[in-house]
Image (cartoon, grey):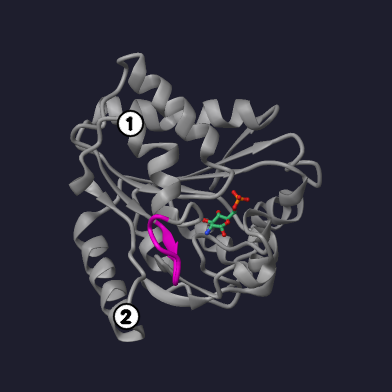
Amino acid sequence: KMKVIRCKNYDECSKAGAEIFSKAIENNPNIILGLATGSSPIGIYKNLVKDYQDGKISFKDVKTYNLDEYVGISRENDQSYYYFMHDNLFNHVDIKEQNVHIPSARGTESEIKAQCNAYNEALKKASIDIQLLGIGGNGHIGFNEPGTSFEQETFVVTLAERTREDNKRFFNSIDEVPTHAITMGIKNIMNAKKVVLVATGANKQEAVKKLLSNEITTSFPASALHMHKDVVVIIDEEAGKML
Ligand code: GLP
């Protein structure tokens, strides 16, 4: 059964989420974290940076694996997830660059496929201790869009229109929003020992309602998490309004 933590607002959710990660890092300095991008985790990363600055935690021996990356966007582009992770977390803590893993999606189609397979192999060996997740308005996790098999491993995905619409606020226009991404599959996500999903704001009301409705269906990818034995869902008042 999913554990639900209900908080007042985004900041409180961020604190609650960061506390889980902070404690886990303290208990296991060699921890392997699965990390996410999007607006949902930013507050968690801010709190983790603060805990690092306060000397509570170190990332010296922490390893990280990110969920996903856009295809066709360079690392230097401020919309790449590579850039996002460095900007919001890695540049501010003592993590070693060789311990940071973000799928790379550069080059020709076959080069991208190869990078995708290599990432999948690395994930199989790594065994993630805690995976952080946001949730898309359509229930996607990582970039596993509705209809994705729960057996799916890391792959190159064509983004749903809803996802491109949701994310266009970060770009000048919809035409600039990538059409493809590399993402961990649902199976990779389910392999994590623990999952922490954070959802806040009015945009997520529908998704949160479906997530907590207990129905398991590939048309709502996050519902796979009902089959995981250790999931914590952190929501704020706005996101929980339809419950
Ligand atoms: C993106 C990411 C997801 C994220 C989702 C929600 O598409 N690939 O990992 O969970 O959007 O984003 P946000 O937290 O900004 O609402």
Which residue carries the number 2 mark? 113
Q: Is residue 203 magenta?
A: no
Marks 1 and 2 sit apart, C-alpha to C-alpha, by 33 Å
Q: Residue 38: in sight, yes or no?
A: yes
In this rendering, is residue 19 above or below 233?
A: above
Q: Which quarter of the figure is the C terminus placed in?
A: top right
Q: Is residue 166 left or right of residue 129?
A: right
Where does ligand 1 appear, by image quarter?
bottom right
In this rendering, is residue 170 above or below 96?
A: below
Disc assigned to residue 157: none
Tell me which corner region of the image, top left, top right, bottom left or bottom right, holds residue 159.
Answer: bottom right
Residue 134, percent from left and from top? 55, 50
Tell me which corner region of the image, top left, top right, bottom left or bottom right, holds residue 56.
Answer: top left
Which residues are the magenta region? Answer: 67-76
Asked whether mark 1 and ligand 1 are closer than 8 Å, the reply comes as no
Q: Is residue 93 left or right of residue 163?
A: left
Q: Nearer the viewer, mark 1 or mark 2?
A: 2
Q: Nearer the viewer, residue 122 or 173?
A: 173
Q: Residue 19: in sight, yes or no?
A: no
The amino acid type found where label 2 is placed reads Lys
Query: Residue at horizontal 34%, vertical 38%?
Result: 90
Q: Evaluate if marks 1 and 2 touch, with contact meaning CB atoms under 8 Å apart.
A: no
Which residue carries the number 1 mark? 24
